[in-house]
Image (cartoon, grey):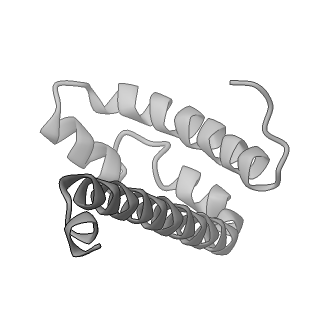
């Protein structure tokens, strides 16, 4: 009886059960953390989405501070940043609205 309790096959079985349990716990923790991150992203977007016009107005001129900083850090001229950022931020905001309101379509 004691020999079968501590046999090589029994240790292999306990090892497999431990691996299975650990994997299940890891998957559960990842699903839980993903749900929390999703909730936080929705809450953040709901609090910032009313500021869309102010954000876009802050990056639509080549002399705006953020545009000037991006131009200084990259080789892209400030005029290109001033043309690109409002369109990009508008598209991003519309995409976030659709995704977070459950209206997302096929990618």
Please state, as top left, top right, bottom left or bottom right, where the N terminus lies in the image. bottom left
Q: How many marks?
A: 0
Dividing the picture into quadrants, the one containing residue 43 is bottom right
Residue 41, given in percent of the width and then of the height, sits at 57, 65
Question: Closest to the observer: 50 or 102?
Answer: 102
Q: Give the residue displayed 85% in from the left and 43% down from the top.
A: 103
Left or right position of 40 against 30: right
Position in image of residue 77 (x %, y %): 26, 26
Q: Residue at x 76, y 25 (%)?
A: 106
Lateral position of residue 104 relative to residue 82, left or right? right
Q: Residue 64, relative to residue 22: is it above or below?
A: above
Residue at x 43% of width, y 35% of height: 82
Task: Name the foreground residue: 15 vs 47.
Answer: 15
Location of residue 72 in the rendering, given as x and y in whole percent from the top left corner: 15, 40
95 sits to left or right of 2: right
- Looking at this view, is 31 or 53 the one in front? 31
Seen from the viewer's position, the closer of residues 62 and 17 is 17
The answer to whether 55 appears left or right of 68 in the picture is: right
Percent x, y for residue 54?
A: 59, 62
What residue is rendered at 25% in x and 42% in y? Answer: 70
**Residue placed farthest to the front in the image?**
1
């Amino acid at each position: 009886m004691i020999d079968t309790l501590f046999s090589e096959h029994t240790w292999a079985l306990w090892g497999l059960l431990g691996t299975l349990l650990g994997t299940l716990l890891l998957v559960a923790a990842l699903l839980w953390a993903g749900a929390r991150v999703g909730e936080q992203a929705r809450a953040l977007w709901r609090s910032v989405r009313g500021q869309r016009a102010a954000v876009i107005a802050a990056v639509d001129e080549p002399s705006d501070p953020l545009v000037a900083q991006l131009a200084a850090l990259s080789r892209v001229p400030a005029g290109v940043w001033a043309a690109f950022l409002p369109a990009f931020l508008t598209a991003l905001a519309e995409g976030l609205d659709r995704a977070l309101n459950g209206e997302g379509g096929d990618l």
